[in-house]
């Protein structure tokens, strides 16, 4: 008899746990089937020689990875991805932070500017890319070049000249996603403790000093989080490339994800494409770990 | 404590009810599908196409029903329309699985890979009843291997020039029809007309095929010029010809039109022939329907001739049967029926035929209401007889993406055509073994 309450408690806990598992089961099933299983399969395929069209699967060891080393297109797309990220990430973060600090002041027209900046975020990526392709036409046919022409500048054929295409894609991508980062930064800016800022001001800190020594450290956790998300997002770019340049000119905008698509769904080299995906996964993983370990060094203040 | 025990039970019972519901619904569905799977007399046939046009699907369905009647069976057809851009990808994935369509259209660029991967059933036996000799060996070349036919082209559509008569008149340029009559319709007079129109009207003289001649359709754009100069990209037996003097001269002509004359809609520019913003473009019979409501008078002409005369380029699409399908024999017979003389004649106005008897018939020349009979003969019928498809290759997608990167170097004013084409040739050679 003495044991009965204990047993009930135990049973009760077990039943609660069961109910809990039951409730998250649909979500977990989806996660396992559509996220985890494919992820594991990509790793498995990356060690196989596998072609979807010709059928046939054979263990290939590290063969795919060895082939990657000798594939000039892979090298090119890897470099292009890094160039793209190196363009998108700093530009996006600097612009977003500057805008957030400015908009955080609540100056005249803030709402209007905020809406304009956020508009591209809710616009379809496909529509955005097609409109930019139109804007960036060469000669004086495109509105951008027409405007430059009015200023006496002959604009290039943005998306069809090797030196300009990557830059053009970067700018269109930054403007597309800027709004979300501005919004997140604004939240952080508005949440900076006013007493700390006031104390700093009383101590004579202002301008750049105030920004570097007080505001930026306060914003650092957000900056870190936003930079991780932006870097990962930039590594995943696909639609912008497919629609604006198709990887050209001269392969100067062929990025890793686009090359994965090409190998997997045009050549049907599923094994080889998986090995590229694994490389991309490792790059993103390493970058994320590096950023998290950097956190302690750069982030004086954890929200 | 007791309270929370009761609370914990409630969700549990809700969950149980939900589970029972889900399981019973699933069981009901399973029972339903079991019933559908019971073998009954009608045969189910799935046909995959990249058209979703209702009239075209109805036409295809009428062939299926005609076939069913001739066999004395009942066929229930399901049409699966896959968007053109995803066609190869989705179809290949389906065919690798067990639920692929029984009959499907095949793209020209996919032909070698589809045959090599044993996805297509041999059609030799099925074709026997339907005058196979009426289909020229040339038309079947891409779809045959080792003496067997694996798919039958239902569309053999030559590329021709579409032109804006109003712009020619406005510029005072001799129209293609006049030049043909004078026997001087060639790439030089074509170039002159293009420049004359640009200079006189400010409107572009020529737009490349679908406006994609610098990008996805670089081969379709250059092939007519290159071949009529006596050059080519590569040949069936693996010879690379893209950097021969003939090919280089041809590409130089086009390059000069874009960068010296500035009469061709340049890369990235979205001016469109069909909107009246270019005087000429390259099209096929299927494009003509876009001109029904055009705000200008238009005409068609065969591609201009080069030093080697008229060398038309044709685009093909074929129909084949799934080698791993449930009704391979029946599906193969259906494919043969759908490309027999009567079916081909019924399709001729949309998809020009590969059958000699239909091509030579009077009714073919009047099969498309928008095209005059003499134009249909000159720009379509005659071109099919002598035309060739683009070069094909098992690894076409890889060659395409790799050579595109080099072709891109052509598209600036200072490009050295010979050295760029030497580089293209080097890419091609890697794949010709």
Image: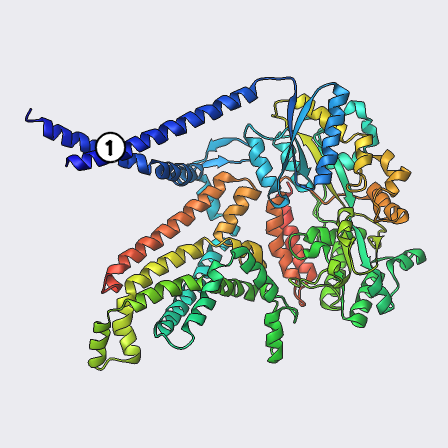
Residue placed most toward the observer, B354 or A75: B354
Residue at horizontal 77 percent and vertical 21 percent from the top? B70
Residue A119: image location, x then y, percent:
48, 63
Question: From the viewer's perspective, is A82 left or right of B323?
Answer: left
Q: Quadrant of residue B15?
A: top left
* Colour logic: rainbow
Question: From the viewer's perspective, is A205 left or right of B328?
Answer: left
Residue placed most toward the observer, B66 or B166: B66
Residue placed most toward the observer, B114 or A127: A127
> Mark 1 sits on what residue?
B9
Residue placed most toward the observer, B55 or A253: B55
Image position of B273 with respect to B40: above or below: below
For the C terminus of chain B, give its image quadrant: top right
Residue at horizontal 82 percent and vertical 31 percent from the top? B342
Residue A275: image location, x then y, percent:
45, 43
Question: From the viewer's perspective, is B91 left or right of B316?
Answer: left
Q: Identify the residue at the far bottom of this view.
A: A204
Q: Quadrant of residue B263?
A: bottom right
Q: What chain is tagged by disc 1?
A: B
For the N terminus of chain B, give its image quadrant: top left
Residue A19: image location, x then y, percent:
27, 34
* Secondary structure of the residue carrying numbered label 1: helix
Residue A198: image location, x then y, percent:
22, 76
Q: Quadrant of residue B142?
A: top right
């Amino acid at each position: 008899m003495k044991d009965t309450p204990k047993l009930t408690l135990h049973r009760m806990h077990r039943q609660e746990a069961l109910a809990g598992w039951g409730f998250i089961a649909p979500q977990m099933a989806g996660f396992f089937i559509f996220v985890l299983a494919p992820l594991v399969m990509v790793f498995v395929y990356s060690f196989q020689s596998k072609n979807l069209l010709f059928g046939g699967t054979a263990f290939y060891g590290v063969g795919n990875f060895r082939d990657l080393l000798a594939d000039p297109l892979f090298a090119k797309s890897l470099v292009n991805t890094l160039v793209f990220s190196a363009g998108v990430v700093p530009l996006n973060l600097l612009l977003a932070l500057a805008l957030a600090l400015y908009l955080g002041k609540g100056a005249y027209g803030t709402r209007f500017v905020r809406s304009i900046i956020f508009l591209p975020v809710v616009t379809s990526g496909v529509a955005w890319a097609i409109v930019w392709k139109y804007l960036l036409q060469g000669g004086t046919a495109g509105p951008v070049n027409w405007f430059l022409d009015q200023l006496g500048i002959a604009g290039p054929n943005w998306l069809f000249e090797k030196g300009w295409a990557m830059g053009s894609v970067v700018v269109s991508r930054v403007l597309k996603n800027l709004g979300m980062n501005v919004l997140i930064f604004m939240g952080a800016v508005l949440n900076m403790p006013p007493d700390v800022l006031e104390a700093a001001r009383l101590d004579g800190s202002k301008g750049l000093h105030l920004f570097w020594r007080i505001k930026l450290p306060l914003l650092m956790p957000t900056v870190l989080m936003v930079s991780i998300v932006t870097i990962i997002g930039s590594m995943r770019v696909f639609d912008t490339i497919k629609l604006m340049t198709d990887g050209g000119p001269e392969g100067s905008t062929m990025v890793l994800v686009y090359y994965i698509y090409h190998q997997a769904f045009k050549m049907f080299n599923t094994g080889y494409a998986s090995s590229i995906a694994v490389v991309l996964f490792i790059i993103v993983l390493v970058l994320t770990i590096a950023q998290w370990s950097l956190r302690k060094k750069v982030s004086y203040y954890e929200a | 404590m007791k309270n929370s025990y009761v609370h914990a039970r409630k969700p549990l019972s809700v969950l149980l009810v939900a589970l029972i519901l889900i399981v019973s619904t699933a069981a009901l569905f399973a029972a339903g599908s079991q019933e559908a799977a019971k073998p009954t007399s009608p045969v189910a046939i799935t046909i995959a196409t990249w058209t979703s046009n209702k009239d075209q699907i109805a036409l295809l369905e009428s062939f299926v029903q005609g076939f069913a009647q001739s066999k004395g069976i009942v066929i229930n057809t399901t049409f699966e329309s896959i968007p053109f851009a995803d066609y190869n990808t989705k179809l290949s994935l389906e065919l690798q699985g067990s639920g692929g369509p029984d009959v499907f259209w095949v793209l020209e660029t996919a032909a070698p890979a589809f045959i090599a991967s044993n996805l297509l059933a041999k059609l030799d036996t099925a074709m026997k009843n339907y005058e196979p000799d009426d289909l020229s060996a040339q038309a079947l070349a891409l779809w045959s291997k080792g003496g067997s036919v694996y798919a039958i082209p239902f569309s053999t559509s030559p590329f021709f020039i579409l032109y804006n008569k109003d712009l020619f008149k406005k510029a005072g340029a001799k129209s293609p029809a006049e030049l043909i009559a004078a026997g001087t319709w060639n790439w030089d007079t074509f170039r002159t007309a293009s420049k004359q129109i640009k200079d006189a009207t400010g409107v572009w003289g020529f737009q490349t095929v679908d406006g994609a001649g610098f990008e996805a359709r670089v081969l379709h754009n250059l092939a007519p010029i290159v071949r009529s100069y006596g050059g080519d990209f590569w040949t069936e037996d693996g010879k690379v010809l893209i950097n021969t003097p003939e090919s280089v001269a041809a590409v130089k002509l086009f390059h000069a039109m874009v960068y010296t004359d500035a009469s061709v809609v340049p890369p990235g520019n979205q001016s469109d022939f069909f909107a009246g913003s270019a005087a000429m473009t390259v099209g096929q019979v299927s494009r003509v329907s876009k001109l029904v409501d055009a705000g200008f008078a238009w005409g068609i002409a065969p591609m201009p001739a080069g030093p080697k005369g008229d060398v038309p380029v044709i685009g093909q699409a074929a129909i084949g049967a799934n080698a791993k399908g449930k009704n391979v024999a029946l599906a193969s017979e259906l494919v043969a029926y759908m490309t027999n003389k009567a079916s081909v004649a019924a399709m001729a106005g949309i998809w020009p035929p590969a059958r000699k008897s239909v091509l030579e018939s009077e009714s073919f020349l009047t099969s498309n209401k928008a095209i005059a009979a003499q134009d249909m003969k000159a720009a379509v019928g005659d071109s099919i007889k002598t035309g060739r498809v683009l070069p094909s290759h098992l690894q076409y997608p890889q060659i395409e993406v790799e050579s595109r990167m080099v072709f891109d170097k052509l598209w600036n004013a200072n490009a050295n055509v010979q050295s760029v084409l030497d580089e293209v040739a080097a890419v091609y050679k890697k794949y010709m073994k």
